[in-house]
Amino acid sequence: MSEHIVVTDLNGVRTIRMARTDKKNAITFAMYEAMTKALRGGTADPAIRALVLTGSDDVFTAGNDLYDFLQAGDVQTSPAADFLYTLIATTKPVIAAVNGLAIGIGVTMLLHCDLVYAVSGASLQLPFINLALVPEAASSLLLPRLIGHQRAAELLMLGEPFSSETARDLGLVNAVFAAPELAAAVASRAESLVAKPAAALARTKALLRHPDQSVEARLTTEFAAFGHALRSDELKEAVAAFTQRRPPDFSKL
């Protein structure tokens, strides 16, 4: 485990904070292992209904600790790969709070989060080409799908920094906030997710994460999920709350 990962559970939200500020939160294999454990534990714990990934001070993360990677054997079986596979498999909503500098994996991991909020003026960069490396974390697939080939090529083939405002305009970031407002904005959205019906939220996330079906196949998948939802205790609570003119309470379901 790593002392550079701080995990906090509060009101149904697990916050996983990178805290290696003397190295700009460069992620070591030990940090990846700690974050993987925190993600898996949060996913398995019914009391945790949303997950937040963030950094500390004015840095999200400067990327991978190159020393660990240079010492690694097979990167595909490394703790970094384990973290990414775990992040992709997490069924609960994941929010990224990009509180500052985000480089390399600090940007590509955002492609696997459900909501991304960033501080105004933060610098982001995908510098793999400058290090004679290639894209990672499936960014060569997901980034063009999200922002188009030419824009993705510009970010990945030139490797130049871009601002959080540009990331928002491209669709990589949902919204940008002034530094004093970011934590409250993320907390508000996490609280909103916690209040939603967890099973329906998980099914919605699963549907969003599989965009390559044909329209006909997606209709079949959605109808199956919709039919399951119609028989759920969550729907019963939603209908009861509507008829009783009160907010629904999904916390015990």
Image (cartoon, grey):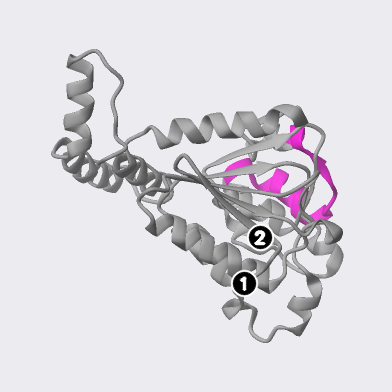
Q: Which residue is mark 1?
A: 1
Q: CA distance from mark 2 to mark 1?
A: 8 Å
Compared to 253, does 175 lie above or below? above
Instruction: Name which quarter of the figure residue 215 lies in.
Output: top left
Image quadrant where one finds the C terminus: top left
Mark 2 vs 1: CB contact within 8 A: yes
Measuring 80% from the left and 39% from the top, which residue is drawn there?
Answer: 122
Measuring 61% from the left and 77% from the top, which residue is drawn there?
Answer: 78
Q: Position of residue 180 (x, y in %)?
A: 75, 28
Residue toward you, 173 or 6: 6
Query: Does 231 sit left or right of 99 as displayed?
Result: left
Residue toward you, 218 or 230: 230
Residue 241 magenta-drawn? no
Q: Position of residue 139 (x, y in %)?
A: 63, 57
Give the main secondary structure, helix, strand or loop, of the magenta stretch. helix
The mark found on residue 5 in the picture is 2
Q: Position of residue 15 (x, y in %)?
A: 57, 48
Image quadrant where one finds the N terminus: bottom right
Q: Residues within 10 Å of mark 2 (few under 14, many from 20)?
A: many
Callout 2: SS: strand
**Amino acid type of disc 2?**
Ile
**Amino acid type of disc 1?**
Met
Instruction: Name which quarter of the figure residue 132 lies in.
Output: bottom right
Q: Tell me if residue 95 can be seen.
A: yes
Callout 1: SS: loop
Q: Which residues are magenta?
A: 146-166
Query: Does 64 sit left or right of 224 as displayed?
Result: right
Instruction: Name which quarter of the figure residue 171 lies in.
Output: top right
